[in-house]
Every structure is written in structure tokens, then in C-alpha cells.
């Protein structure tokens, strides 16, 4: 036989009736306890939880209604069913006032008793279900509100308001735990003795939760001496203290109390669910605050880094210009090995100039809105100029550079300075990563009514697939920082991408392992229609 989870206590001064009721209900799977007097019921109910009280109306000492009234003082949610041989309207009204849920008339059959018990339990189940459904409304509202807030104080305020409203609490206080400290929130204002006393009492309850106590539900009649003292300090009769818990720690405590009447059935369960939802929201708020703080710190460090690069680049330009000027003059006057040595100095000075140009271009990348010049431009001339600027380096590596631009390629209307930055950085990148005796191919084609597509392909070193998008990030290089062989600071491709975007195009990279790498970008042939662009990198 399946056992029911409901526990029933039966009281009647007639032993035969007790035995009969016990047999009938146990056959239905209920857990049954019997008592022979009202006082015995009260003693049992104080020590053990029962779901239903089945009592005779007329008994010596305490009547059934008095028994129900006494038990409900410390077990307000118990279901009460009375057995009676006669009933009057006055008695029925009085029974309803005392919370009697169902009647069964003597003599009764087993079916009639079972029907009365089932009906009473079904009423209670329905009442609990209604309460559960009612509880879902504020929980839904809380979740909806919490999804839209990342402020800890706002989460706590909403939690306190909903808990106070739904449980009709006369006193509400919330505490949070952090770093071993217990902090009150939204506490009552005022310095009077009663207010301070309440704050001390609520702090004591929060401390119990902090030390690991589960949810505390108590009233002044059945509480232990310590809890009774706390309720007296609060000026309340009934209290519920619910922990706010995460998976790893206790985040706080929600304290609610009522002065004259007990909390409704299911309030403790409702508060468990409510506290669980609020705990998730609190953790999200804490996480957001940490991310925000980390973001602000990162932004500050990024700004400091950029400022340092800009200042250093500007300060390096002047002495480098003087160094290159004198080195170039000496190169013209020298012969033989000394001329070769001076050529090396000039060549490496030019490399240093490219690095500084990259660093200065970073300032453009972070300036926000970028305006565009609209002037005639020959792509062939711009590409040949870029190749000439890098000829010393490419010749040293014995590189073959092929420029494939159709003779009838149209004249562009574009910003020459930004186009130069794109072309120079892409060709410079190709020269740097192409092994000696390798090949670089620059290709340009008209691919739309007002669009062109340009590709720069170099043989040799390839880029892993996972790095094809990251190569455009500032300061990112595919090689590990401690094993770089090709120099540079990782700004060239980032600058090229930024300038392509500003000029109304897109750029991407492709690579075949061990064979070649190609950077392809699109641009409008005529940029007259473009307005100021916001740089996005």
C-alpha cells in the first residue's frame, strides 16, 4: 500500500471511535496518531508536526473547538475536521470562525469519513496552490525588475519592498555580508532608544544567519529564550529570517516580523524562492561591478599607454631626423667598407622612422571622428611611391615586387594621406614577412560601379587560421613576444584596417599554410559621397 505523506492526529473520549477512525484512515495510507483528551493533543502537537486534526466536538475538559483553537496558536496551518452527533447554526458559525475546515456527522461510514478528510485536504492543497500562483506574480515582477538593474542597492531595495508587501510584515530589515562584516541597508532613521533596540535585535538575528543557521521561523509563544528576547526587543510576536545564499557563501539575511498575527501559510517557502532569485541578482550585480571596475582600470591603462607612445614618438622624431641627415651626408662622402657601414646606419634609421610613423598614426586611430579629404589620386603613383620608399629593404632581401594595375584603371577621388597609410603598411608588412628571394604581388581591380578591390600577396610565412582576424588588433603579433624575429610593434595592420574602414571599405586576410598570405581590401573609387567616419578598431 502506498503511504500518504499526511500525518493525522485524532482525539475523542470514546476509545471505540478512536480505534475505528484509526483503522479507516490507516487503510487509506495516512500516518495516524490518537489522543484521548484535548490536553494530550496539545502536548503531542507541540512536539510533532501534524497536517490534520480530527476531533470530537463534545469532550470532557476541553471541547473540540477549544482543542482546535489551542493547537492553531502554535500550528496555524493545521487542517481541522470535527466529528459531532448534532450541530446547530451557532456552533457551525463558531467553528468557521475558529478555522474548522470540514464536519462529519456521527454515525458515519468509512466512506463518509474518508470523504470528509479528503475534502478538507483538497481544500488545503487548493489553497496552497492558489498561494503558490499568487506568489509567482511578485516573483515574476521581481525577476523582470532585476533583469534591468545592475545596482546592488536597487536589488536590495526591490527585494525588501516585495517581501514586506507580500507578507504584510510590520518590520523589515536586510543585511549583507562581505569581508566578514555585516552591513545593514535601509534601516530606520532616528536615535530614539526603541529604534536602536530594534537595530541591535535585527543585527543579532543576521549574525545567527552569518554563523550558518538555516531559515528561522518562530513566534514568541514557542521560541527559545534567546529568540523570545529578540522578538521582545523588536516589539513583535512572529518572525522569519531568511538567508541570501550563493553556491559558495552566504550573501546576507532578510528579516521580517509581525506584531499581532502570524505569517500566512507558505510565506516561509515564498521567501525562500524570493531570496534565491535576489541572491542570483546580487551575484550578477557584484560581477557587473567588478567587470566595470576592471574595464575602467583597463581604459585608464590603455590611455596612459597611448599617451606614452605619442609623447615618446614625438620626442624621438627630432634627434632621429638630425641623425639621418648627417648619416646621409657622410654616406655620400665615404667610399668602400665605410660607405657600406654608413648605408647600414641609414637603412636602420629608416626602419626606426617607420616604427615612429606607426606610433604617431596611433593618435589618429584614437581621435574619434575622422574627416576625409577628397582629391584626385593616381593609385599607380601611390603604389610606386610606397615601393620606392621600401626599395632599400626589399633589395637587401632580394625580393621581387610585382605591381598588377590595369593601364585603364580610373583616377580615384580619395584622401591621399590615408590611402598612403594603407598601402605603405600593407607593403611594409609583406616585405617584413617575406623570406629572402620571395615574391610580393600588388593587384588592383575595379569590382563594381564605384568599388575597387586591392590585394597584397606575399610568399613564405603563413598565418594560422585562428589568428587571421586577430592580426588586425593593435600590438598583436602572431609570434610570441619573446621570440619575435621580424621586429615591429604590431601597429601596421591595425592602422591599415582603421584607415580602410574610415575610407568606406573592408579588409580581411587569407593564408595558405607554407605558401602565401594575402591581405585584401575594398575601397570606393570616388569617396565624394562619404562623410566624417567614426573609427572602429
Image (spheres, grey):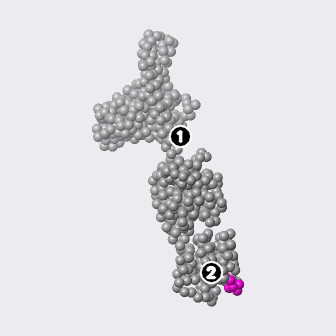
As measured in the structure, the alpha-carbon distance from the residue carrying label 1 to the one carrying label 2 is 88 Å
N-terminal-most mark, 1 or 2: 2
Q: Is residue 441 above or below residue 121?
A: above
Q: Is residue 323 above or below residue 482?
A: above
The tag on residue 63 is: 2
Q: Position of residue 48 (x, y in %)?
A: 67, 70
Q: Does the magenta segment cover residue 16?
A: yes
Residue at 64% x, 65% y is 222
Task: Say whether residue 28 is left or right of residue 165.
Answer: right
Look at discs 1 and 2 and give the one toward the viewer: 2
Q: Which residues are magenta?
A: 12-17
Q: Is residue 28 visible?
A: no
**Which residue matches tag 1?**
464
The tag on residue 49 is: none
* Quarter of the image that includes the C terminus: top left
Task: Say whether residue 27 is left or right of residue 457.
Answer: right
Instruction: For the residues labelled 1 and 2, say whether their Cβ atoms are less than 8 Å apart.
Output: no
Q: Residue furthest bottom?
A: 107
Q: Position of residue 212 (x, y in %)?
A: 64, 54
Amino acid at each position: 500500500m502506498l503511504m500518504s505523506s499526511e500525518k493525522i492526529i485524532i482525539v475523542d473520549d470514546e476509545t471505540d471511535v478512536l480505534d475505528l477512525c484509526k483503522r479507516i484512515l490507516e487503510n487509506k495510507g495516512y500516518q495516524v496518531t490518537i489522543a484521548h483528551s484535548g490536553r494530550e493533543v496539545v502536548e503531542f502537537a507541540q512536539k510533532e508536526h501534524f497536517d490534520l486534526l480530527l476531533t470530537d466536538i463534545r469532550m470532557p475538559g476541553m471541547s473540540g473547538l477549544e482543542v482546535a483553537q489551542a493547537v492553531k496558536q502554535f500550528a496555524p496551518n493545521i487542517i481541522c475536521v470535527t466529528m459531532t452527533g448534532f450541530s446547530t447554526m451557532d456552533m457551525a458559525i463558531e467553528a468557521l470562525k475558529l478555522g474548522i475546515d470540514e464536519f462529519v456527522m456521527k454515525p458515519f461510514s468509512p466512506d463518509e469519513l474518508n470523504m470528509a478528510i479528503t475534502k478538507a485536504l483538497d481544500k488545503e492543497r487548493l489553497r496552497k496552490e492558489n498561494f503558490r500562483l499568487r506568489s509567482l506574480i511578485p516573483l515574476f515582477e521581481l525577476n523582470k525588475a532585476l533583469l534591468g538593474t545592475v545596482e546592488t542597492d536597487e536589488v536590495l531595495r526591490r527585494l525588501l519592498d516585495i517581501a514586506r508587501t507580500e507578507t504584510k510584515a510590520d518590520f523589515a530589515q536586510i543585511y549583507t555580508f562581505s569581508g566578514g562584516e555585516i552591513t545593514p541597508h535601509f534601516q530606520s532613521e532616528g536615535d530614539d532608544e526603541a529604534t536602536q533596540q530594534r537595530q541591535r535585535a535585527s543585527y543579532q538575528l543576521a549574525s545567527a544567519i552569518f554563523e550558518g543557521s538555516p531559515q528561522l521561523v518562530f513566534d514568541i509563544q514557542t521560541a527559545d529564550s534567546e529568540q523570545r528576547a529578540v522578538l521582545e526587543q523588536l516589539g513583535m510576536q512572529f518572525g522569519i529570517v531568511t538567508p541570501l545564499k550563493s553556491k559558495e557563501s552566504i550573501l546576507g539575511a532578510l528579516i521580517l516580523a509581525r506584531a499581532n498575527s502570524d505569517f500566512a501559510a507558505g510565506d516561509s517557502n515564498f521567501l525562500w524562492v524570493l531570496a534565491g532569485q535576489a541572491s542570483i541578482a546580487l551575484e550578477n550585480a557584484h560581477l557587473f561591478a567588478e567587470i566595470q571596475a576592471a574595464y575602467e582600470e583597463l581604459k585608464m591603462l590603455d590611455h596612459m599607454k597611448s599617451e606614452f607612445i605619442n609623447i615618446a614618438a614625438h620626442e624621438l622624431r627630432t634627434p632621429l631626423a638630425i641623425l639621418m641627415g648627417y648619416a646621409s651626408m657622410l654616406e655620400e662622402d665615404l667610399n668602400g667598407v665605410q660607405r657600406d657601414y654608413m648605408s647600414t646606419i641609414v637603412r636602420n634609421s629608416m626602419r626606426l622612422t617607420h616604427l615612429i610613423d606607426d606610433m604617431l598614426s596611433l593618435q589618429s586611430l584614437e581621435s574619434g571622428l575622422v574627416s576625409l579629404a577628397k582629391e584626385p589620386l593616381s593609385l599607380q603613383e601611390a603604389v610606386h611611391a610606397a615601393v620606392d620608399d621600401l626599395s632599400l629593404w626589399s633589395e637587401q632581401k632580394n625580393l621581387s615586387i610585382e605591381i598588377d594595375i590595369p593601364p585603364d584603371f580610373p583616377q580615384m577621388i580619395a584622401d591621399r594621406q590615408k590611402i598612403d597609410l594603407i598601402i605603405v603598411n600593407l607593403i611594409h608588412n609583406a616585405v617584413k614577412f617575406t623570406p629572402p628571394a620571395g615574391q610580393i604581388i600588388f593587384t588592383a581591380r575595379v569590382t563594381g560601379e564605384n568599388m575597387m578591390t586591392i590585394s597584397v600577396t606575399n610568399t613564405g610565412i603563413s598565418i594560422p587560421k585562428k589568428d587571421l582576424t586577430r592580426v588586425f588588433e593593435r600590438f598583436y603579433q602572431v609570434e610570441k613576444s619573446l621570440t619575435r624575429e621580424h621586429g615591429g610593434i604590431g601597429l601596421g595592420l591595425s592602422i591599415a584596417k582603421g584607415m580602410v574602414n574610415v575610407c568606406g571599405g573592408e579588409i580581411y586576410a587569407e593564408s595558405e599554410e607554407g605558401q602565401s598570405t594575402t591581405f585584401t581590401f575594398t575601397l570606393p573609387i570616388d569617396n565624394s559621397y562619404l562623410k566624417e567616419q567614426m573609427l572602429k578598431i
